[in-house]
């Protein structure tokens, strides 16, 4: 089945950790007008993006983000950090710093989206928004 123009996609850069998948999918569908969150998963993606050292992984993330934004017309990019991350085993405080850095880095990738939203998945697998960058307003300011 091919996707149609009325289907609404979002882009989700999530950890590959299986415990984070359903909570994140559910939270996004419940809180946003989204039908299909595209899941782009890595082990500790905020570390990869914040550090910006592993160019191969960065390109792989961008490759999938390109499809999600350009083909599925996603207008929202979510970035997820979570409790007990094996791929990024640092304290929550450090993770939140990495998450914010990752949001800024993704903004520099210049995707034509409305918002880049950072989410934290806590100990009970509850999802909480941490920070969001409004991209479309920024564009209007530049004009
Ligand atoms: Zn993880």
Image (cartoon, helix red, strand yellow):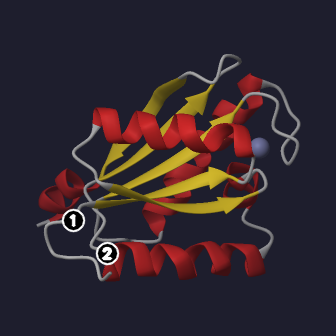
Point out the quarter of the image occupied by ligand 1: top right
Q: Quadrant of the N terminus?
A: bottom left
Q: Which residue is mark 1?
A: 7
- Relative depth, front residue between 11 and 132: 11
Where disc 2 sits, the SS reads loop
Left or right: where does residue 78 sit relative to residue 120?
Answer: left
Q: Quadrant of residue 45?
A: bottom right
Q: Quadrant of residue 77?
A: bottom left
Q: Residue 52 in the image: state x and y as whole percent.
A: 72, 65
Left or right: where does residue 123 sit relative to residue 115?
Answer: right
Q: Quadrant of residue 39?
A: bottom right
Q: Which residue is mark 2?
A: 72
Q: Residue 9 in the image: state x and y as whole percent.
A: 31, 62
Q: Residue at image x 11%, y 67%?
A: 143
Q: Residue at image x 74%, y 74%?
A: 57
Mark nearer the N terminus (2 vs 1): 1
The answer to whether mark 2 and mark 1 are in CB contact below 8 A is yes
Where disc 1 sits, the SS reads loop
Does 52 appear above or below 62? above
Does 55 appear above or below 9? below
Label 2 CA crowd tier, 10 Å (few <14, some 14–19, many 20+): many
């Amino acid at each position: 089945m091919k996707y149609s123009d009325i289907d609404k996609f979002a882009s989700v850069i999530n950890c590959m950790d299986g415990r984070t998948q359903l909570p994140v999918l559910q939270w996004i569908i419940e809180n946003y007008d989204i039908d299909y969150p595209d899941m782009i998963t890595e082990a500790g993606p905020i570390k990869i993006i914040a550090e910006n050292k592993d160019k191969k992984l960065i390109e792989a993330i961008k490759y999938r983000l390109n499809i999600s934004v350009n083909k599925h017309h996603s207008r929202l990019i979510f970035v997820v950090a979570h409790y007990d991350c094996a791929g990024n085993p640092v304290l929550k405080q450090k993770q939140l710093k990495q998450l914010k850095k990752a949001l800024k880095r993704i903004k520099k990738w210049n995707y034509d989206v409305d918002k880049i939203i950072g989410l934290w998945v806590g100990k009970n697998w509850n999802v909480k928004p941490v920070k969001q960058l409004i991209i479309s307003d920024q564009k209007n300011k530049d004009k």
